[in-house]
Amino acid sequence: MVCLAFAPAANLFAQFHTDSEDATVSTFVINEMVVEKQADINFGFVSNDISVNEPLIDPTDGSTSFIAGDVMVGKFQINATDGQSIEITDNSPVTLTGPGSVTEIDFVALLSGFMGTNASDFGGTSVNTGESFSLTDNIYTVWVGGTLEGGSSLTIGEHQGTYTLTVEYVFN
């Protein structure tokens, strides 16, 4: 009888020390972000002394200073989820290397952007790297121009470097 008397008390004790609650599991699926280069950056021909007059390509209107020949504004298209925030960063300044020993040329990027697809070779409004903003379209076009900085008596020949545009979603 003693065992029967404690069995209901043990069950009553378990009822007071056990509880449960449900939680909703949810997620919001977004597009995988894709950054596609559509055009490289080309400064054409510049002087071997850029210490005073720095070559410039303006990405908003395609204008140039202290440059001759074929010039090309860089262009990227970003495909992402509209309504989400993104942040654009880059690896500017980029050191250009070339033949010879005097290759002190740095590319300092200037960016402009446009919400949506744009077939133009330049355009948009200025974009500051490192600042986030909300997309109102699932496509964002970025143009890249900039300046070349360097010294005098640069080695004659082609100088190149690799510019990298990085875009990431920003979640608050």
Image: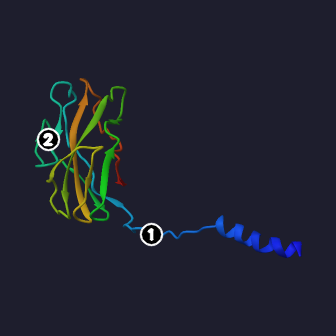
Residue 11, disc: none
Q: Quadrant of residue 19?
A: bottom right
Q: Nearer the viewer, residue 81 or 47?
A: 81
Mark 2 to mark 1: distance in Å? 57 Å
Question: Could you tell which of marks 2 and 1 lies nearer the N-terminus?
Answer: 1
- Inspect the image, locate mark 2, and give the three-letter code of the amino acid beneath it: Ala
Provide the secondary structure element on which disc 1 rests: loop
Q: Position of residue 153 (x, y in %)?
A: 25, 24
Query: Colour scheme in the image?
Result: rainbow
Determine which residue is flagged by label 2.
68
Label count reads 2
**Residue at the spot x=70%, y=68% of the render?**
14
Quarter of the picture containing the N terminus is bottom right
Q: Position of residue 125 (x, y in %)?
A: 14, 50
Q: Nearer the viewer, mark 2 or mark 1?
A: 1
Provide the secondary structure element on which disc 2 rests: loop
Q: Position of residue 122 (x, y in %)?
A: 15, 53
- Inspect the image, locate mark 1, and give the three-letter code of the amino acid beneath it: Ser
Relative to residue 7, is residue 120 depicted above or below? Answer: above
Residue 26, disc: 1
**Residue at the spot x=76%, y=74% of the render?**
8
Relative to residue 93, is residue 134 depicted above or below? Answer: below
Pointer 2 local density, CA inside 10 Å: few below 14, some 14–19, many at least 20: few
**Residue at the spot x=87%, y=73% of the render?**
3
**Residue at the spot x=19%, y=60% of the render?**
115
Q: Which residue lies most toward the right here?
A: 1
Is 167 positioned to the left or the right of 12 in the image?
left
Q: Position of residue 57 (x, y in %)?
A: 16, 42
Q: Quadrant of residue 96?
A: top left
Q: Nearer the viewer, residue 85 or 88?
A: 85
Is 159 positioned to the left or the right of 125 in the image?
right
Is 61 positioned to the left or the right of 107 in the image?
left
